[in-house]
Amino acid sequence: MDDAGLEGLFAAARDDAPVPSGDFMARLTEQALAEMPVAGAQVPEPRPGLWAQLWPALGGWRGLSGLVTACAVGVWLGISPPAAMTTGLGLDDLWGRNADLGEMGVDPLSGFELALLEG
Amino acid sequence: MPYDAMSERADEELLAAYARGDAAAARALTQRLAPRVLAHAYRMLGGDRAEAEDVTQEALLRLWKAAPEWRPGEARVTTWLYRVTANLCIDRMRKRKRIGTDIDAVPEVADAAPSVAEQMQQRARAEALQGALDALPDRQKQAVILRHIEGLSNPEIAEIMDIGARAVESLTARGKRALEAVLAGRRAELGYEDDD
């Protein structure tokens, strides 16, 4: 059997393809419809990643820019507090300028010891 | 959507519509895919129609179940179906071989009126080829059917069989040589002496 002969057999096989009967097609269609998800039902989407979940929780770009500004202002006040915050409001002690911690600069009675004294 | 409009849509698009509950897409996909799956299963299973119908039903059922999770662009529906169908057939063929069913019976060509005789000769050729295909190793048989009867390209077959394109070429070449050897003594019986 040569190539041409074999090609003739392949062509015969292509022509001999089985034709599905009407009953069989009806059964298959019925099965397809029975397995079909209900119209309007949500097809489950892949779960979003951690950042995708965190982003809306932070309020998106607007929320994040507010957070960054608040952090920057906090750092700035900590490093270089404006004079208005320390004068005239009696806050000098708070910033430690007049606090008397003795010569060693150490609090002689810690909060822990006070708690012990009080029982 | 009307059925006619469905014929223009890609299988993947119809499957996505099916997953959203589109009954017209279910009908269109069944009409389009079932004949191809049935023909492939029929050839893989040595012309056993009843078993080919079982495989078709099972392969399509798996497609419907996979539809909601189908990721567009990941695989072609036909490629996926050919793979599932071939695997189901190979499982059945192995079971048959274990229980020793004879699948190589090829009927003789009978004398008849010319047009009927021609039809019978075509049928006899198809059956002779089927008998010879059944004598091949499973993977060679699958590659030859996909390439020379279903008319798929080598890259498509490579994807279906999960092998390289060169391995497909090798399988189909060896398969054809084996078929030529099996059918060597049957030229006259299959009407090739008269055709030359």
Image (cartoon, grey):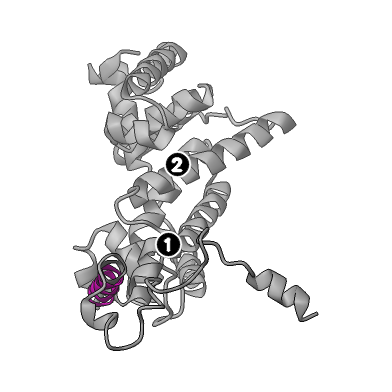
For image coordinates 32% across by 68% down, the residue present is A78
Is B164 in front, or is B140? Answer: B164
For image coordinates 61% across by 38% down, the residue present is B91
Corner quadrant of residue B123: top left
The chain holding disc 2 is B
A62 to the left or right of B17:
left
Q: Which mark is residue B150?
A: none
The quarter of the picture where the N terminus of chain A appears is top left
Amino acid under disc 2: Arg
Corner quadrant of residue A99: bottom left
Is B51 in front, or is B25? Answer: B25
B55 to the left or right of A25:
right
Amino acid under disc 1: Leu
The chain holding disc 1 is A
Q: Is residue A93 magenta?
A: no
Label 2 sits on residue: B83
The quarter of the picture where the C terminus of chain A appears is bottom right
Label 1 sits on residue: A50
Is B77 in front, or is A40? Answer: A40
Q: Which residues are magenta?
A: A61-74
> How many marks are shown on the rendered structure?
2
